[in-house]
């Protein structure tokens, strides 16, 4: 089929496809029924809810692709510079509701289905979300795809199609139990497999070095295995606009059978080889910020990087371009160091395969990549042992050594000290030699950014200090943002509706337009409407929590919510200490000032993280104690909501009164939950960590409950020699709370169950819970006092929401476009 000089629309003679926006009820009904009958071969008498979901999803996918195809044409015409976003994780959340919103057909679809006696909400409920990420980092990648689509950034998101995503969390006797995720079990109507977009990826073996007839060194990599990666495309639609593709790679064996073995009758051995290759994309590593250093993880990283780079180069060459100007046409953003082997892989492709001179290839490479750092935690900084990397990727190891030797020579020329040179080297040879992936990513990129103002500052003064001194212009900040259409328009329809009634729809594409609500902040009737919406959201969450856990909350209580991955630095256990202090106050008859509160926790612990799992057990033990004690359970309720996910998050944030953002200062790179809570009208209690600092600046000091040490004070405290035991000795309330942990009252007399937490806090307390305890308690008392004035609370809630403009991922993506990618957006409507 010839497409040159012809618009896609010209192929449709009878009816033009137009856009997928604003479809009529009849069009929706017709497409839905066609998909149900002819797409799935189902009639209503036998159709299940999942059939209805699939039929609607398939119909919607057509309209989404329609928008995507129109964008493609536009992008091709403009010949614009493109972006490839490389991320080992994505957490898109359910697609259906968001796509309906972006096509502006939610209401019409609801009516179309009602005509057929079907309920849209029930159908939406069917969708199983792709849990292809651990937490904030994966969700951020999905927020960014949403904004890149909306703003019209010619882009593609590359990643891994894990067959099993993040485990499902259940509770057994109050402990986390992991259940395998099976998101593909009922099929996935959103993706399209592209068997013709498939690449081969090599592993292992050795290299041969030879000089060719021109005396040029030729390196040949002879691998010992090869695996094929096939593309699965999911269209991601922007708001009433463009679409882009999330392209995930799935591994398969090149030959389905090992024929030699098969012919000899060893059928099982033949199939085993196939299974081994397909292992690569089987399962997501469920660790966040604590890396496993496992061989399979490195294989996953290289596998998806290699497929993605081959694909990007294919696209570049397809357009008749030369590789010499690859970097002028493509930006590749590295989402943390997980895809950073790409630096060596691009060098290999340019030098070994396309015969480019090293210096030129290095110029292209360094101008192609940009690197986003997401963490300063030492245990999360990726390092691969030289031994392992050399065994799996022998040629890449040589290339990394070459990059390093040239880089260190530069430093020597510039008179860097031996100490500095060994600190900056890509190879850490203290102990078992390993590659510092953050250094590789930094050296191989033209820009390096942190994810909040504070984090970017700390990145420059700590982890990458030497590099920041060498290349100050390379370092920049892009504060994270969130997809406000998903996390406000879609998940909080009541609030979205009120906002739109007052100020129109502008905020959907420009979140800073929320400032137009300022004049209503003091308006009593507006405050009342605001409060009613929150109350309804809390009623809905209450029903969900009762259904899932059996615990019945009271929606008139303060909903104090702590949801995020369970990690010691995030200090869920500090929240527990506070709850126990309230409990003891009530028990001692000193609780009259306490505002009735429901404490809601959620979040997964890495399956091998001992302390995190014990913290979950502690929360559920405290919940059991308090919820079953009639002396306190009118004032306090505690619940752990299992299996926190994007889908659940969309129901949790809109129901929150108070957002817990209580990490030890200097540890949370940004946080994005903090933004989603504020966007939905929760007030924050938090430390000066990550993006909390900027949230507080935007919403105003008065509308944010601050406590705790600053990053600098944390550093000083540690430097001076920290002795948590002394704080314990001096603070009577704290001592009572701590001793309660090992009293056996939380654990049917078992005094040892929580001793690991107790001992850790009294002996090391690496995240300074005891040091921040008193300040946290005082800030919480202030929260309870403020809650008693419901008008004041509503006013502060309104001021939170209307000042969230900065935290839309649209703003973040605009920053990336201007500061890092230098791309212009191409809007298609
Ligand atoms: O990335 C988020 C930030 O908002 C959070 O503050 C930060 O903690 C989070 C290894 C990570 N940093 N590092 C990870 C995830 C998976 C993995 O295997 C590390 N996640 C973050 C978005 O910037």
Image (tube, rainbow, N blue to C red):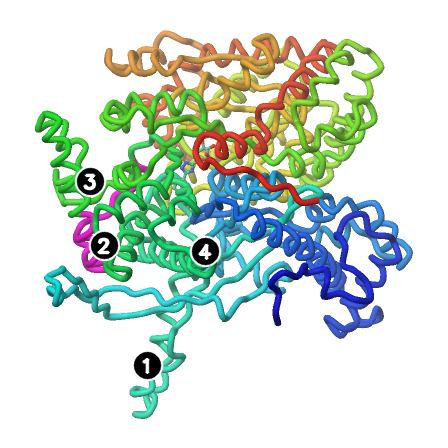
Inter-mark Cα distance, 4 to 1: 27 Å
* 300 in relation to 474, above or below: below
Local crowd size for mark 3, using a 10 Å CA cut-off: few (<14), some (14–19), many (≥20): many
Instruction: Judge depth for marks 2 and 1 and give the one in front.
Output: 2
Question: In the rendering, which numbered label is found on residue 160?
Answer: 4
What quarter of the picture does the C terminus occupy? top right
Q: Nearer the viewer, residue 283 or 318?
A: 318
Instruction: Judge depth for marks 4 and 2 and give the one in front.
Output: 2
Residue drawn at 55 percent across, 19 percent down: 695
* Residue 742 visible at all: no
Q: Secondary structure at mark 2?
A: helix
- Place of residue 650 in the rendered image (x, y in percent of width and height, measured from the top left): 65, 38
In primary-sequence order, the first of circles 3 and 2 is: 2
Magenta stretch bounds: 379-400
What quarter of the picture does the N terminus occupy? bottom right
Q: Secondary structure at mark 4?
A: strand
In primary-sequence order, the first of circles 2 and 1 is: 1
Q: Pointer 3: what residue? A: 426
Q: Pointer 2: what residue? A: 396
Q: Secondary structure at mark 1?
A: helix
Instruction: Judge depth for marks 3 and 4 and give the one in front.
Output: 3
* 305 in relation to 268, above or below: above
> Would you say residue 396 sits in the magenta stretch?
yes
Please state if 409 lies on the left or on the right of 513 as rendered.
Answer: left
Q: Secondary structure at mark 3?
A: loop
Inter-mark Cα distance, 3 to 4: 26 Å
Local crowd size for mark 4, using a 10 Å CA cut-off: few (<14), some (14–19), many (≥20): many
């Amino acid at each position: 089929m010839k497409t040159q000089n012809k618009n896609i629309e010209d192929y449709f003679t009878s009816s033009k496809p137009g856009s997928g926006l604003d479809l009529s009820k009849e069009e929706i009904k017709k497409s839905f029924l066609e998909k149900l009958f002819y797409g799935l071969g189902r009639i209503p008498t036998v159709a299940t809810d999942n059939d209805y979901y699939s039929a609607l999803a398939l119909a919607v996918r057509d309209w989404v692709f329609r928008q995507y195809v129109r964008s493609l044409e536009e992008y091709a015409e403009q010949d614009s510079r493109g972006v490839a976003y490389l991320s080992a994780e994505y957490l898109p959340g359910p697609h259906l509701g968001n796509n309906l919103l972006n096509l502006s057909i939610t209401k019409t679809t609801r009516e179309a289905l009602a005509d057929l006696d079907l309920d849209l909400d029930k159908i939406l409920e069917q969708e199983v979300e792709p849990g292809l990420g651990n937490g904030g980092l994966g969700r951020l990648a999905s927020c960014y795809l949403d904004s890149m689509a909306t703003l019209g950034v010619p882009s593609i998101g590359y990643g891994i199609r894990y067959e099993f995503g993040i485990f499902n969390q259940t509770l057994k006797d109050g402990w986390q139990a992991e259940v395998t995720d099976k998101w593909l079990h009922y099929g996935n109507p959103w993706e399209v497999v592209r068997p013709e977009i498939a690449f081969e990826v090599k592993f292992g073996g050795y290299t041969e070095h030879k000089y060719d007839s021109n005396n040029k060194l030729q390196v040949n990599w002879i691998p010992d295995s090869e695996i094929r990666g096939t593309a699965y495309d999911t269209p991601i639609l922007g708001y009433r606009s463009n679409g882009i593709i999330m392209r995930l790679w799935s591994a398969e064996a090149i030959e389905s059978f090992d024929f030699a073995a098969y012919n000899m009758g060893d059928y099982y051995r033949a199939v085993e080889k196939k299974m081994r290759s397909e292992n690569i994309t089987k399962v997501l590593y469920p660790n966040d910020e604590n890396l496993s250093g496992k061989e399979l993880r490195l294989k996953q990283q290289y596998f998806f990087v290699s497929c993605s780079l081959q694909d990007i180069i294919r696209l570049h060459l397809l357009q008749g371009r030369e590789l010499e100007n690859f970097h002028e046409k493509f930006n590749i953003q590295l989402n943390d160091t997980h895809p950073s082997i790409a630096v060596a892989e691009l060098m290999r492709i340019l030098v070994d395969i396309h015969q480019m001179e090293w210096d030129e290839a290095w110029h292209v490479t360094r101008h192609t990549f940009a690197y986003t750092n997401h963490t300063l935690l030492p245990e999360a900084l990726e390092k691969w042992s030289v031994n392992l990397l050399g065994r799996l990727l022998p040629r890449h190891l040589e290339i990394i050594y070459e990059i390093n030797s040239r880089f260190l020579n530069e430093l020597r020329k510039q008179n860097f000290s031996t100490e500095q040179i060994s600190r900056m080297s890509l190879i850490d040879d203290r102990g078992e030699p390993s590659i510092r992936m953050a250094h590789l990513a930094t050296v191989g990129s033209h820009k390096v950014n942190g994810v909040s103002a504070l984090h970017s500052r700390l990145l420059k003064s700590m982890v990458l200090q030497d590099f920041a001194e060498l290349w100050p212009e390379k370092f920049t900040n892009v504060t994270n943002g969130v997809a406000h259409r998903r996390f406000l328009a879609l998940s909080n329809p009541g609030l979205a509706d009120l906002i739109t009634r007052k100020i129109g729809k502008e905020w959907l594409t420009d979140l800073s337009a929320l400032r137009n609500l300022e004049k209503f902040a003091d308006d009593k009737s507006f405050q009342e409407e605001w409060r009613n919406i929150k109350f309804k959201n809390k009623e809905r969450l209450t029903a969900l929590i009762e259904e899932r856990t059996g615990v019945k909350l009271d929606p008139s209580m303060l909903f104090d919510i702590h949801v995020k991955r369970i990690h010691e630095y995030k200090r869920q256990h500090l929240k527990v200490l506070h709850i126990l202090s309230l409990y003891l106050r009530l028990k001692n008859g000193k609780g009259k000032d306490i505002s009735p509160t429901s404490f809601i926790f959620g979040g997964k612990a890495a399956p091998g993280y001992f302390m995190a799992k014990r913290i979950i057990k502690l929360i559920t033990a405290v919940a059991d104690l308090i919820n079953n004690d009639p002396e306190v359970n009118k004032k306090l309720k505690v619940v752990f909501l299992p299996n926190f996910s994007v889908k659940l998050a969309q129901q949790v944030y809109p129901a929150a009164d108070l957002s817990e953002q209580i990490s030890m200062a200097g540890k949370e790179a940004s946080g994005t939950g903090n933004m989603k809570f504020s966007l939905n009208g929760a007030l924050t209690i938090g430390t000066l960590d990550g993006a909390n600092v900027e949230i507080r600046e935007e919403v105003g000091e008065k509308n944010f409950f601050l406590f705790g040490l600053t990053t600098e004070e944390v550093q000083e405290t540690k430097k001076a020699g920290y002795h948590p035991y002394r704080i314990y000795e001096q603070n009577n309330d704290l001592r009572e709370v701590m001793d309660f942990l090992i009293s056996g009252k939380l654990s049917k007399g078992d005094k040892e169950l929580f001793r690991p937490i107790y001992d850790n806090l009294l002996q090391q307390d690496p995240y300074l819970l005891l040091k921040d305890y008193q300040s946290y308690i005082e800030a919480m008392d202030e929260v309870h006092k403020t809650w008693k004035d419901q008008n004041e609370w509503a006013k502060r809630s309104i001021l939170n929401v209307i000042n969230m403009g900065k935290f839309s991922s649209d703003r973040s993506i605009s920053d990336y476009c201007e500061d890092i990618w230098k791309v212009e957006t191409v809007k298609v409507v």
